[in-house]
Image (cartoon, rainbow, N blue to C red):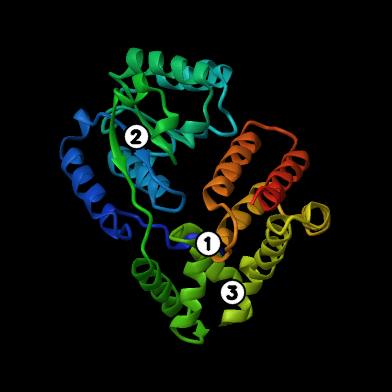
Amino acid sequence: MPLEDLMWVEKYRPSSLEDLVDQTAVKQRLMALLVKKGQLPHLLFAGPPGSGKTSTAVIIAKQILGEHWRDYTLSLNASDERGIDVVRERIKTFARFADRREGVPYRLVILDESDEMTSDGQTALRRIMEENSEHTRFILICNYSSGIIEPLQSRCVIFRFQRYDEASVTEHLKSISKKEKLRHQGDSVFAAIYEATQGDLRQAINTLQAASASGELTVESVKAVTGAAVKGRVGAVIEAALGGDFEAARTRMVELTRVYGIPERDFLKYAYETLGSMKGFDRARAVSIFAEYDFRLVQGSQPELQLAAMLAQLARLKKEG
């Protein structure tokens, strides 16, 4: 595929550790480890989405395995393939095969979103790591290291990636804009992108590309892409609930999820973000309610019913106050 046809997040993906945006401490520690490639331990990358974890894993694979890195790397998204069967069949089969080609010290398994793996899957993975460490290395990638069982954590060197600050994101977006010869309205557009993406560099780059589809980047086009209007509608739902009007809140919530197609997790995210600008309620209780229903959605509970129950609890805060 021609370079100009690539998504920008791929087109401008860093090709070396030096090219990574920020994450100075991570880069320095990894460079020290890569001096002796054969002694590289298993790695665990933890940190928020869009902070460079997957890009770093790919850079390491290329640096260690060279031009044949794809042939000797198994990359899986553990949130999609997270059960014990996948661990036993795909990962075990790949990891137990020893390569003797010159220049290939070992195979590499990259497990993205590994904190989504089941407990049984992680336990099986621990045994595979123990049995095949001589000719296979693992890079586990997760948002929260607390989702990784202790026996797995103890077998890895842990690297914690930080959320990008506004200055780092803005500088990188400006660099891409210059290379793509974009017309824009100044720093306000980059501030709008950062506000919408909150340090997620991958999402920021995707937003930049989508908002500049017409060839000009404006605050209005950024808002259209990021759903700022949708966020405002979700805020109205929460205002109605905290005002004690459960029926109105539930009706608007159903409209947003069914008619406008807002994913339930996005609804919850936008709803939580609006709390900071609201007053007149027990904020601590409200945060506890959000946390409870976020957990329920993660566990696979019926989304619309759970959101309605959440709104009912928020509405009850008004009566109790």
Query: For this rendering, which residue is in front, 132 or 84?
Result: 84
Of badges 1 and 3, the one in the foreground is 1
81 or 106, nearer to the observer: 81
- Mark pair 1, 3: CA separation: 22 Å
Residue tagged 1:
276
Q: Residue at x 83, y 57 (%)?
A: 259
> What amino acid is labelled 1 in the image?
Gly
Residue drawn 72% across the image and 55% down it: 241
- Mark 3 residue type: Val
Q: Is residue 43 above or below residue 10?
A: above
Q: How many marks?
A: 3
In this picture, is 315 found above or below 61? below
Residue 190 is left or right of residue 261, and the answer is left
Assess disc 3: are there few (<14), some (14-19) or many (≥20) residues with their C-alpha within 10 Å of its C-alpha: many
Residue occupying image coordinates x 35% and y 19%: 151
**What label does residue 100 carry, if any?**
none
Q: Quadrant of the N terminus?
A: bottom right
Above or below residue 311? Residue 231 is below
> What kind of element bears circle 3?
helix
Q: Provide the secondary structure element on which disc 1 rests.
A: helix
Name the residue beneath numbered marker 2: 44
At which x and y percent is residue 280? 59, 61
* Front position among marks 2 and 1: 1
Residue at 79 percent across and 59 percent down: it is 260
Rendered position, 49 above or below 84 = below
* Amino acid type of the residue that numbered disc 2 sits on in the rendered structure: Leu
Q: Distance of mark 2 from mark 1, alpha carbons?
A: 33 Å
Q: Is residue 16 left or right of residue 293?
A: left
**First in sequence: mark 1 or mark 3?**
3
> Residue 112: percent from the left, percent from the top?
47, 37
Residue under numbered circle 3: 222
